[in-house]
Amino acid sequence: MAHRADKRPHEIRFTLNSKGLTFADVARECGLPESTVRSATRKPSIEGEWAIAYFLNLPASAIWPSRYDSKTGERLKPQPAANYTDFPRLGHCQKDIAA
């Protein structure tokens, strides 16, 4: 799972919404597919991360510290495997698991 200090997807959405923006707005303004921007909240995507960071007026390393070197602020290459593990979903959305 992603680093504890990483902003959760719903926190990122809330902050964008509080600025009157959606993932679709960010994607449109940056010329990216909406899926790239939306999936950047859960899994590493440099273009999506930078687009969101730009509109939140924050460095991407402040939003996703697990994806960046804490000393230099540079993006990690390759990304840690844990960054590709998705956040848990609500029970009613999971197959084969009683809610």
Image (tube, rainbow, N blue to C red):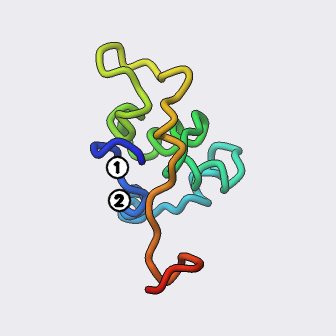
As shown in the figure, which amino acid type bears the numbered disc 2?
A: Glu
Q: Secondary structure at mark 2?
A: helix
Cβ atoms at labels 1 and 2 below 8 Å apart: yes
Q: Quadrant of the C terminus?
A: bottom left
Q: Is residue 40 left or right of residue 65?
A: right
Identified at 43% across, 58% down, the residue is 9
The amino acid at mark 1 is Lys
Q: Position of residue 2 (x, y in %)?
A: 40, 45
Residue identifier under label 1: 7
Residue at left 51%, top 39%?
49
Label 1, residues with CA under 10 Å away: few <14, some 14-19, many ≥20: some
Q: State the image coordinates of residue 93 (x, y, percent, origin top left).
A: 53, 79
Q: Is residue 47 above or below residue 90?
A: above
Closer to the camera in the image, 7 or 58:
7
- Is 94 positioned to the left or the right of 90 in the image? right
Q: What residue did someone put label 2 on?
A: 11
Determine which of the numbered discs, if any, sits on residue 38 in the image. Answer: none
Q: Residue at x 51, y 48 (%)?
A: 85
Work out whether 71 lies above or below 11: above
Q: Which residue is at the front of the view, 77 or 24?
A: 77
Question: Could you tell me residue 41's position as x and y percent?
Answer: 49, 51
Give x and y (percent) for residue 74. Answer: 43, 18
Helix, strand or loop for disc 1: loop
Vertical side of 60 occupied by 31: above or below: below
Q: Residue furthest top?
A: 72
Marks 1/2: CA distance? 6 Å
Q: Residues within 10 Å of mark 2 (few under 14, many from 20)?
A: few
Q: Is residue 48 above or below residue 92?
A: above
Q: Quadrant of residue 45?
A: top right
Query: Who's the residue at 52% across and 62% down the image?
Result: 22
